[in-house]
Image (cartoon, grey):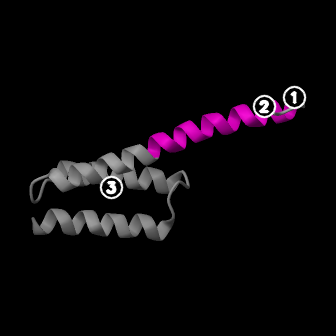
């Protein structure tokens, strides 16, 4: 357990950051799931998926190549259905 005042504050901050990161990860997972159930050429689902992936990338939750791979997977899935 944290003893000093600074360590306690750092622990509180890490808990808040963890909660936000988990929210972003869940948004990406939800967007990918929506893509799997969407119709071919559904631009709203595509835009939502791109938005969730880009936000996760911006916040450093996923890496650059992971984001690119997922975006390519989403685009391919919606174009071939």
Please state the horizontal and vertical placement of residue 37, each as a whole percent of the image. 16, 51
Q: Where is mark 1, residue-wise? A: 5
Q: Where is mark 2, residue-wise? A: 9
Looking at the image, is mark 3 or mark 2 nearer the viewer?
A: 2
Q: Quadrant of the C terminus?
A: bottom left
Which of the 4 image quadrants contains residue 46?
Answer: bottom left
Question: Judging from the image, what secondary structure is the residue with disc 1 in?
Answer: helix
Residue 22 lies in the magenta stretch: yes
Q: Is residue 48 above or below residue 78?
A: above
Q: Is residue 18 above or below residue 56?
A: above
Which of the 4 image quadrants contains residue 72?
Answer: bottom left
Residue 15 lies in the magenta stretch: yes
Mark 3 / mark 2, whichever is N-terminal = 2
Question: Judging from the image, what secondary structure is the residue with disc 3 in?
Answer: helix
Please state the horizontal and vertical placement of residue 9, each as a whole percent of the image. 78, 31
Prevailing SS of the magenta stretch: helix
Q: Where is mark 3, residue-wise? A: 50
Q: Judge left or right: residue 7 versus residue 50.
A: right
Label 1 vs label 3: CA separation?
Answer: 41 Å
Task: Read off the magenta span.
Answer: 6-24
């Amino acid at each position: 357990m944290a003893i000093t005042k600074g360590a306690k504050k750092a622990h509180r901050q890490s808990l808040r950051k963890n909660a936000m990161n988990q929210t972003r990860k869940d948004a990406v997972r939800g967007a990918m799931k929506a893509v799997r159930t969407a119709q071919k050429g559904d631009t709203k689902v595509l835009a939502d998926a791109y938005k969730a992936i880009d936000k996760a990338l911006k916040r450093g939750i996923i890496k650059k190549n992971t984001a690119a791979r997922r975006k390519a997977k989403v685009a391919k899935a919606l174009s071939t259905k």
